[in-house]
Image (cartoon, helix red, strand yellow):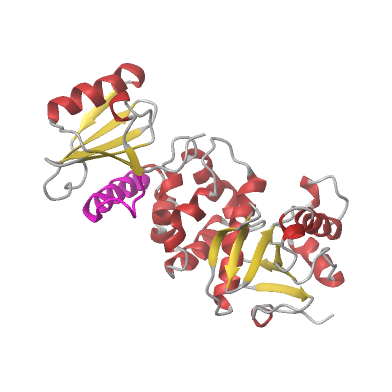
Amino acid sequence: MAGPIRFRRSSERWNAGRVHDALYQPLDAKFGATTADPWYRPPDGYEARRIAMDNGDLALFCWSDDDAYWLGNTETPKTLWRTNKCSFEEAPHGVARWGKRELLAQLEQEDPWLAEYDHLAWFFLPVFFSKDGRESTRAFFRDHAGGFPDADREAALSFYEELLSTGLLDDHRYTMASKLGTSDGVDLTRMQATMGEFNAAKLLADAGHDFEPEVELGSGHALDFQVDDILVEVTRPQPTNRRKIDSPIHAVKASGDAKTRDQIAIHGNAALFVDCSSFPDDDWRRILGERPDVGHEPAVVFRMRPDGTTEGYVKGTLHLDVAGELELPAR
């Protein structure tokens, strides 16, 4: 399974003839390809070409007297196999800006409904153009409203567009975006779990907390967030129609139990955030009515909706100020 799209940097000498012979010809022989000028002016001092494959793959290449950069979601030509990869943030600003503009324009041509959400499109660009995940990640937002049940696509996209427009997760873009997946199939459970981390990040930020995502610990585990000296792990239980469990109450408890037997078992002082945003209204009302324990304290059990509503409850003593962000219906 390929990872999110990244640049490859070559320090060798390039010219138009070598681009044709070493890059275009092997791709044309294998996939059928068309080479053309880029849609946008390349960075100062660089020449550039677009190579479009007949199977929908795309490659961009720019070169100067000093170096060259490849950006593609197709098979990497052999001459570039030993080159180093770098993210958009690690590439020179002009190169990264040019590559971003080319890909966003391609996205607008292929999926204009998605490209109109500027911040969301930019944030997930590395997976929207990954070799294996470009179809599945776009389908997740198109067909599954970003993981929200009983919500229309526009409302869900607007919700995450507003969240990402704050820049809250910009410094952790590759880490967070790549969790959505780079496989060619839609794994709805895993993708919803990923967006549960975005929901938890919003809840922490709304409460005024700074955090570090995907914290590597000495135990060999990685927990989802660290807020000062408090660790946070997120779980997202699934509705009962997708589990061999007979009620939403049991689904919430089972999800919490799975975490307490794994990461939380070793880091018992961590807070467990249980994102119930996958549950439809009726199931969520049952959970709120009973407010079940989840096998660990402190715990935050919450559900977000695309209109910005966040309901939930806290179990145990939580040294985070998220309770004030939760709407707690009267019992």
Q: Is residue 70 left or right of residue 290?
A: left
Q: Is residue 23 left or right of residue 271?
A: left
The one of 184 and 152 positioned closer to us in this rendering: 184
In the rendering, at what x and y percent does residue 212 appear?
53, 66
In the rendering, at what x and y percent does residue 177 appear?
49, 52
Q: Is residue 29 above or below residue 70?
A: above
Q: Quadrant of the C terminus?
A: bottom right
The one of 92 and 194 positioned closer to us in this rendering: 92
Q: Is residue 4 above or below residue 15?
A: below
The one of 326 and 23 positioned closer to us in this rendering: 23
Magenta region's main secondary structure?
helix
Quadrant housing residue 183: top right
| Residue extending furthest toward the top | 29
Residue at 11% from the left image edge and 40% from the top image edge = 65
Q: Is residue 90 above or below residue 293?
A: above
- Check residue 103 for magenta coloring: yes
Q: Is residue 147 above or below residue 85?
A: below
Residue at 13% from the left image edge and 25% from the top image edge = 17
Quadrant housing residue 317: bottom right
* Range drawn in magenta: 86-109
| Residue extending furthest toward the front | 218
Residue at 51% from the left image edge and 62% from the top image edge = 160
Residue 186 makes an appearance in the image: yes
In the rendering, at what x and y percent does residue 220 appear?
63, 51
Residue at 49% from the left image edge and 63% from the top image edge = 158
